[in-house]
Amino acid sequence: SVDPTVAVRLVYDIHWVLTKSQKITLFNAIYHDLILNRSHWNLYTVTFILLHMCKLGVYKPSIIKSCLKNISRKLRISKYHPGVNQSHWVNSMLAVLANYTVASAGINQSIEEALQSFIEPPYINLSENQRKLHPNFSDVHKIFTSDWVVKLFDDISQHVTSQQIVDFNSLKCLVQIIYSLSLFGYKADSIIEQYNEAEKRLRDNVLTISTMSTELADLTELSRFINMAKSLVSPLSRNSSENEKLSVLSFPRSDWRFYYHCGFGLLESNVISDPLISANLLHKSRCLDQLYRLLFENKREFNIIRMHRLQCIQCSNGDNGNIPYFADILFQKISTRHTGKYNYVICIVHEQRDLVVKGPLLSLLNFYRETQRLPVVTFNLSVWQMSSKQGKKLIVQKFLQEISKRLDEVDHFPLPEIHTTDIILQFD
């Protein structure tokens, strides 16, 4: 059979003449050949395939499952060979899957450099822009909530914590595994506990030697990944430490960074200047065109509700000042109790991945609910997109009933003066 890396390179070289469906068909053939010929299944080949699939925007949950099952197989074998440390191999495989799921690939790099970057966990290095982040609209995070996958992550934690941390490289491997698992929504408490103990021991050792500045800087850099991991699986707040807040800037997904940006109260205007955030919001807005159409189909029942997409909302919040708030959708209805006033409900449209990697979205929702009086609801775009035509209608009817109820509830309370403007997306 043909070497899968050769076949992948051929597909990549001619991708500009292929349709999306043709690319998927060719990668399906390569993947099935890989499954049938296990001799080709190794870290290099899998990395090569997923790197190029990532660059071409082709996402296959089945290949992610195969990689996870291969990790499980490695760990089962290691139980019969207790002296074999699989941590570094597992670390590389998790990093490859993390890069693939968040659509992070090398930019202006040779193929070998890109492959080397792909086996390192994805993050934004503010001083070296060596990663290209693509607007990945394929949400595959549901895979990581399966019982067998969670059990696998538990097994990984058990294997990793059974190994000794003897130097900086083994500690770095530990940290990268913690961070990669957090990108799948898994909080590796037992590994974090081992890291804390090992980091303190290594730091104490560093302080006993004279050339300690570089080693201490390396240990400090590792703490950034720990902060990133914690803030991916648990929400931060405006009262969180500065180091925790700064770690958010290195998140590999622009929408996660944006959620925290809004959740820290840092949105300053209605202009979104980050091209990746703009692309993500534009994608969501286009998906909501269907919601618009179904809204009008239900106009008889919900004719007094207006729906505005991508809005910047400013309201007088007393001690909190005039903070701008972002809304994917702003629902509006004339107040029946306050003449000349409107009632509003803010809606944040999210994907399934934001319920798996829940820290960023929860941070935004907590901030909104703590600092202003408008009701805040969420809409799961992933569930919406996977539903049938009839299923989408039922989702819309149920959703609009909830919105109508929340609009009626808010009518009983006096609201501050509210000003809204359209969000402006910039792509340059």
Image (cartoon, rainbow, N blue to C red):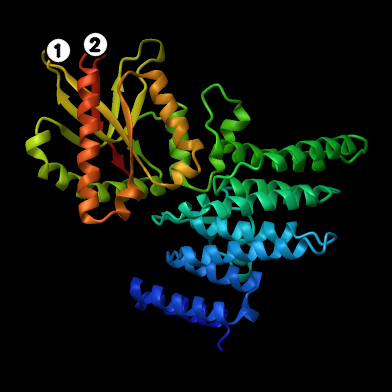
**Image quadrant in which the N terminus is located:** bottom right
Q: Single out the residue that lies furthest toward the bottom.
A: 1
Residue 380 location, quadrant: top left
Residue at mark 2: 414
Q: Where is residue 230 in the image (x, y as percent from the top left)?
A: 60, 37
Q: In this view, does 412 lie to the left or right of 175?
A: left
- Side of 284 where 107 appears, left or right: right
The secondary structure type at the circle numbered 1 is loop
Could you tell me which residue is drawn at 41 percent across and 49 percent down? 276
Residue tagged 1? 338
* Crowd band around label 2 with a 10 angstrom C-alpha radius: few (<14), some (14–19), many (20+): few
Neighbour class for label 1 at 10 Å: few (<14), some, many (≥20)? some
At a point 19% along the width and 29% down the height, the residue shown is 404
Label 2: element kind: loop
For residue 297, say whether it is visible: yes
Observer-nearest of 88 and 391: 391
Vertical arrangement, residue 145 with respect to residue 271, above or below: below
Residue 117: horizontal and vertical position, in percent?
62, 60
- Residue in the picture at 81% in, 40% down: 198
Percent position of residue 106, x then y: 55, 61
As drawn, 388 above or below 291: below
The residue lying toward the viewer, choosing from 119 and 303, is: 303
Of mark 2 and mark 1, the one earlier in the sequence is 1
Mark 2–mark 1 Cα distance, whole angstroms, equals 8 Å
Q: Are marks 2 and 1 in contact (CB under 8 Å)?
A: yes
Please tell me in which quadrant of the rendered image residue 410 appears. top left
Looking at the image, residue 49 sits to the left or right of residue 378; the answer is right
Give the image location of residue 240, x and y in percent. 58, 25
Q: What residue type is labelled 1?
A: His
In-image side of 166 versus 427 (left or right): right
